[in-house]
Image: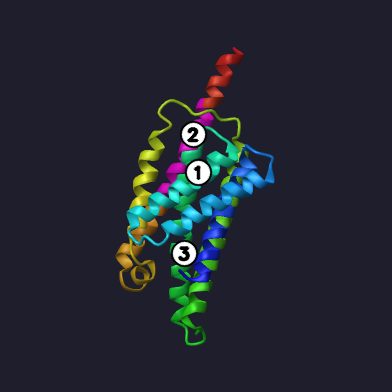
Amino acid sequence: MSISLIFSLIAELLIVAFVGFYLYTPRFHNKLMNGFILTGILVFAFLASFYRQPQYFVIATLMCFLALLLLLYKMPLFSGILTACVLLLFTVIGDFISMLIMSISLQSQYFYVYVPLQNFISLLISDTVFFLLSVLYVKFQKKISFLQPIKYSWLILVVLVPTVFLLFSIPNYFFMVENDKVVMFTVLSLMLSNIITIFIFFKFQISQNMKLKLKEEE
C-alpha cells in the first residue's frame, strides 16, 4: 500500500469523525478512549485494504464508517447506518470526479507528472470532494435535526446499499472515463439519482414530521 493511500484512508476516517462530531453528542469525553477507538478502526481499515475484492472492501469500509459513528457518538442505529451509507456514496463520487479531472488534465500537453504524484493528486481531489460533500450533508442535517425516523424509513437503504456495492464493483474509474463514455454517463446518472432520492427522502421526512407536530398541537 502506498503512503498516499494510507494518508487518504486516515483522511476519510477523520472526515467521518467530523460528521459525527457536528451531528451527534460524543459518547466519551476521554481523549485516550477516543484515540484508542480511532486507532483500532484505522488498523482494521488498513488490514482490510489489502483485500482487493470489491465486495470485501466495501463491506470493510462500511463497517469502519459505521463502527466509528456508533462507538464515538450517541446516535440511533438507523441514523448511523444511513449516515455511513451516504458517506460511502460520497467517497465513490469523490473517486469518480477525481478520475474525471485527472483524465481531462492528462490529455493536456502542459500537464505531466510522475505516476506516484498523479496518484497523490487524484487521492487529494477525491478526499477534497468527499469533505465538501460531507460539509453540505452536515449543514443539511443540522437544519432538520428535529426529525424522527418515520415508518418504512429503512427503505431508503434498499436504494443506497445496492448502489454503493455496484459502484464499488467497478474496477477502474480512470479506464472507464477514458474508454467507455456510455458507462461513465450511466454511472454519473446513477450517482445523481441517488443524491436526488436522498434529498426527496429527507424532504418527505420533514413534511411527515411537520404533520405529526401539528396533530400533537391540535
Q: Nearer the viewer, mark 1 or mark 3?
A: 1
Q: In the rendered structure, which disc, 1 or 3, sits on the residue that comes first in sequence?
A: 1
The residue segment tinted magenta is 192-208
C-alpha gap between disc 1 and disc 3:
27 Å
Q: Secondary structure at mark 3?
A: helix
CA gap, disc 2 and disc 3 = 30 Å
The answer to whether marks 1 and 3 mark residues whose Cβ atoms lie closer than 8 Å is no
Q: Position of residue 114 (x, y in %)?
A: 49, 83
Instruction: Point out the tag, 2 or 3, that comes first from the N-terminus.
Output: 2
Query: Disc 3 marks which residue?
Result: 97
Which quadrant of the structure image shows residue 93?
Answer: bottom left
Q: Residue at x 50, y 26 (%)?
A: 208
Q: Secondary structure at mark 2?
A: helix
Which of pointers 1 and 2 lies earlier in the amino acid sequence? 1
Q: Main secondary structure of the magenta part?
A: helix
- Where is the N terminus found, in terms of image quarters? bottom left
Judge by depth and name the residue closer to the eye, 39 or 95: 39
* Crowdedness near tag 3: few (<14), some (14–19) or many (≥20) residues, C-alpha within 10 Å: many
In the image, what residue occupies the spot 43% across and 31% down?
153
Q: Could one spot residue 151 in this view of the protein?
A: yes
Residue 27 at what x, y percent from top left?
62, 37
